[in-house]
Image: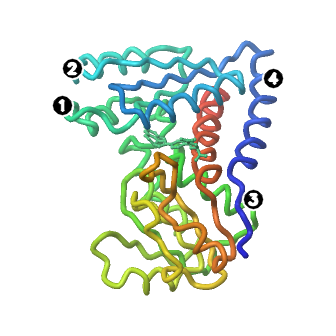
């Protein structure tokens, strides 16, 4: 049976450390501030934003959540971002993705000042990451690296396979593993014989966005399996991209959904916000 990588517990430990740090900062008159802009009423986004709000409050971060009607124009949204760029009480700006179709997400991400880009999605921060000098790092892959570290899983020299090539998970994940000297293979929906490629992996990161996609045929015995998926099944239950019950007996380590990568994503968001206020 695989060892469970408990993201919820680890995120709780990180949150406790941040809470202490923020209370010390407050003695010096510094209060970290985070704004989350949520455009429209995507129900999944509502849950994530709520979890971020709870976590920020617990840590003592000044948290602003702006729920904005989907009818906002791109220009109006850009003006809001510019105002928060100038606002000295705000150390982190997050615009929840996806955005409504009439708004160009690339333009919006480019408008956030790179110093306040706690998501690490700005092309400047992406560029810094890809030349090997990261500052802000996309929170999901960053949280995954923290989980590997906490469980003493060393990527160096190992074969890592990443399934999914998004800008916010797959690509930065591959780069972070590469920076730790893993031998990295990127795979995606067009990869031929994906199960055979995945089966080569010592570390398998799955971020393809399809519920129960990865079965035991994808997993080498003893492999580390990281599940980034957040899908709902027919009954509305939250499920990962990995068929957990089937893969768990084969894997060496595995992350659950919920309680794995999700809470770590939020913890890293908080960490990068506090780090910004510290500077
Ligand atoms: N600009 C931007 N930054 C993001 O970081 C971002 C985003 N947009 N859009 C959506 C995705 C998704 N995401 C999650 C964060 C936490 C959980 C999370 O807390 N999950 C819990 C429980 C979730 C539940 O119960 O529904 C868990 O896995 O245990 C999930 C998903 C951040 N995202």
Task: Please say if the residues under marks 4 and 1 sit with CB atoms less than 8 Å apart.
Answer: no
Please report the residue visible at 47 percent of the width from the left and 65 percent of the height from the top: 212
Q: Residues within 10 Å of mark 4 (few under 14, many from 20)?
A: few
| Color encoding of the figure | rainbow
Farthest residue, direction front: 235
Residue 254 % position (x, y): 64, 67
Give the foreground label among 4 and 1: 1
Query: Looking at this view, is 241 or 190 the one in front?
Result: 241
Point out residue 31 in the picture as x, y percentages from the top left corner: 67, 17
In the image, is residue 247 above or below residue 261? below
Camera-nearest residue between 12 and 270: 12
Estimate how packed mark 1 is, as few (under 14), some (14 to 19) or many (20 or more) residues with alpha carbons within 10 Å.
Answer: few
Q: Which mark is residue 73?
A: 2
Q: Say if mark 2 contacts mark 1, CB within 8 Å.
A: yes
Give whichever of discs 3 and 1 has the lower sequence position: 1
> What is the CA distance from the residue labelled 4 to the residue labelled 1?
43 Å
Q: Position of residue 10 (x, y in %)?
A: 74, 49
Q: Is residue 134 left or right of residue 126?
A: right
- The residue singled out by tag 3 in the image is 150
Point out the residue furthest to the left here.
102
In front of the other: 142 or 66 = 66
Q: Residue at x 55, y 24 (%)?
A: 34
Q: Which residue is mark 1?
A: 102
Q: Earlier in the sequence, mark 4 or mark 1?
A: 4
Look at mark 4 in the image and give the residue it sits on. 24
Q: Tell me how far mark 3 sits from mark 4, CA to CA.
A: 25 Å
Query: Quick one: SS at disc 4?
Result: helix
Q: Which image quadrant is residue 276 in?
A: top right
């Amino acid at each position: 049976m695989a060892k469970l990588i408990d993201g919820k517990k680890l995120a709780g430990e990180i949150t406790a450390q941040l809470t202490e740090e923020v209370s010390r900062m407050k003695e010096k008159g510094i209060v970290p501030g985070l704004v989350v802009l949520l455009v429209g009423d995507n129900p999944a986004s509502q849950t994530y934003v709520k979890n971020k709000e709870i976590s920020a409050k617990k840590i003592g971060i000044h948290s602003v959540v702006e729920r904005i009607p989907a009818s906002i124009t791109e220009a109006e949204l850009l003006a809001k971002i510019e105002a928060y760029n100038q606002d000295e009480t705000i150390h982190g700006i997050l615009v929840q993705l996806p955005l409504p179709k009439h708004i160009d997400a690339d333009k919006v991400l480019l408008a956030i000042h790179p110093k306040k880009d706690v998501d690490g999605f700005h092309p400047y921060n992406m560029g810094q990451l890809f030349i090997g000098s990261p500052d802000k790092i996309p929170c999901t892959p960053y949280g995954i690296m923290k989980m590997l570290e906490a469980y003493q899983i060393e990527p160096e020299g190992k074969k890592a396979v990443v399934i999914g090539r998004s800008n916010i998970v797959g690509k930065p994940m591959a780069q972070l593993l590469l920076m730790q000297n893993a031998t990295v293979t990127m795979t995606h929906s067009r990869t031929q014989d994906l199960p055979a490629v995945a089966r080569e992996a010592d570390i398998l990161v799955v971020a393809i966005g399809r519920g129960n996609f990865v079965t035991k045929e994808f997993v080498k015995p003893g492999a580390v399996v990281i599940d980034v998926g957040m899908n709902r099944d027919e009954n509305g239950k939250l499920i990962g991209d990995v068929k957990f019950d089937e893969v768990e007996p084969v894997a060496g380590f595995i992350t659950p959904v919920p309680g794995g990568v999700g809470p770590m994503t939020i913890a890293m968001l908080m960490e990068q916000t506090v780090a910004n206020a510290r500077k």
